[in-house]
Image (spheres, helix red, strand yellow):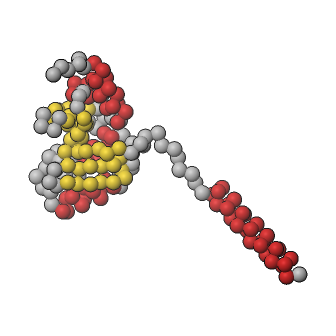
Amino acid sequence: MKQIFHAGLLLCLLAGALQRAAVAETTTPTPAPSSAASRDLHFRIGVECLCAECAFDTQRTLKKFPGVQKVMLSTKERRLTVVFREGDKPVSALSLALAQTPLGKASALEWPAPGLTALARVPGVASARFDDKKRLVLLTFAAQPDVTLAQLEAATRTAETAAPPTTK
C-alpha cells in the first residue's frame, strides 16, 4: 500500500511539473530574430567640456536609445564607443540623438576608410571628412533621410571595388 501511495504521489508531482512547463512554454514570449548584429560604433567627441556631469548625462541618454546595448567614454582619446544593434532606429538617428547631448554637439561617427566620396554621396550624410592621422572618415548626418549601417557598408564596398590597386 505504501508503494502505491509513493507511486501515485510521484505521478501527481510529475504531471504538475509537466503542466507548469507546458503553460510556461505557451506564455513565455520568444525574442524576435534580429537580422542585424551588434556593432561597435566610435564617435569622435569635438567639445572641450568632458566633465563628469556631461559624461553621465550623455551616457544615460544614449543607454535609453533603442538598440544601444553599451556606452563607453574615453576622455583621453575623446572618443565615445557605442555597442549598437540597428533595428527600429537607424545609425543616423543615433548620431542625431548624440548631437543633442552635452558631449555630442560636435561629434562625428568614425568610419573606416576608404570611401570618402562614396560615403559623402549617401543621402542623409551631411558631411564626410578624412582624418589623415587616424585614417578614418568622420561622418555627420542630416535630420532626413535616415541613413543605415547597411547603406554605409554598401558605399564602402562600392568604393573598395572601384578603387585602383595600389602599388608600393
Q: Which residue is more in the foreground, 119 or 11?
A: 11
- Identity of the residue furthest to the right in this view: 1
Can the viewer see residue 105 in this picture?
no
- Give percent across and percent down for residue 85: 39, 45
Above or below residue 1? Residue 129 is above
Above or below residue 130? Residue 168 is above
- Give percent across and percent down for residue 66: 39, 49
- Give percent across and percent down for residue 81: 26, 49
- Identity of the residue furthest to the front in this view: 168
Name the residue at 21% across, 41% down: 108
- Identity of the residue furthest to the bottom in this view: 2
Name the residue at 34% across, 28% down: 154
What is the quadrant of the C terminus in the image?
top left
What is the quadrant of the N terminus in the image?
bottom right
- Give percent across and percent down for residue 17: 70, 67
Image quadrant assignment for residue 5: bottom right
Name the residue at 29% across, 54% down: 71
Above or below residue 131? Residue 20 is below
Locate residue 70 relative to residue 18 in the image: left or right. left
